[in-house]
Image (cartoon, grey):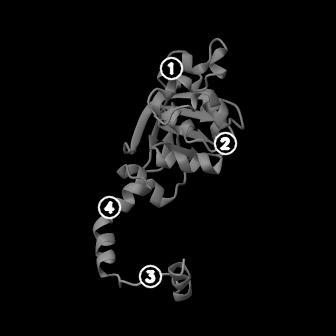
Amino acid sequence: MTPFSRLSGIAAAIPLANIDTDKILPARFLKTISRDGLGRGLFADMRREPGFILDRAPWSRAEILVALDNFGCGSSREHAPWALLDFGIRCVIAPSFADIFYNNCFKNGILPVTLPSATIAGLIDLIVDPATATIDVDLPGQIVRDGHGAGHRFEIDPSRKNGLIAGLDEIDETLRREADIAQFEANRPDESWLPDIVVARFARR
């Protein structure tokens, strides 16, 4: 997983609430287990409308997405954050996120930032102007700086923060303890964890 520490990039606004995972990546793009190329399907149905934000410069190079409440609701498809990442989005800022989508972001190196609705509204007013469309995201400092340089602090679970900075998901974290796991297994008594009565029943079959 690519580490995330600091990001300065173009931010695109999609000022809608309840953007579900089917809007992020329609179901017809789920016929693959590969992450490559899914960015072409990102917001595919919404991009049928002429002038969609991600098809216009400079937002076609967006690395940050700003939206309204309950971003990522709907089905649990992990393809949705895969598509965002394949397009180039590394950070999503919204007042709230659906739980499963929020968790999936951390598994894929995307930083979901929760800010108050009033702050989001101010960010959107700025990023619709190319001159102030760049946002700075400082994960170690937990600060988002808008195009005027104003800082907006956000909260994040320390373990998730450290995982993103180090570029480690849960599997990577487990593998870092591989030596400890091997030592535990080597020293573990050679006894079944099953109760004797269960072992006896299986032995009779």
Residue at the disc numbered 2 = 75
Q: Can residue 152 be seen in this view?
A: no
Decide which of 109, 133 is in the foreground and name it.
Answer: 109
Task: Give the alpha-carbon distance from disc 3 to disc 2, as whole Å.
Answer: 39 Å
Residue at the disc numbered 3 = 192
Dot in front, 2 or 1: 2
Q: Where is residue 98 in the image (x, y as percent from the top left)?
A: 65, 47
Amino acid beneath label 1: Ser
Amino acid beneath label 2: Ser
Q: Earlier in the sequence, mark 3 or mark 1?
A: 1
Q: What element carries label 2?
A: loop
Dot in front, 1 or 4: 4
Q: In this view, does 147 lie above or below 186?
A: above
Which disc is residue 160 wearing? none
Tag 2 and tag 1, C-beta contact below 8 Å: no
Amino acid beneath label 4: Arg
Q: Is residue 134 above or below residue 161?
A: above
Tag 3 and tag 1, C-beta contact below 8 Å: no
Instruction: Determine whether, in the image, residue 175 is placed left or right of residue 131.
Output: left
Q: Earlier in the sequence, mark 3 or mark 2?
A: 2
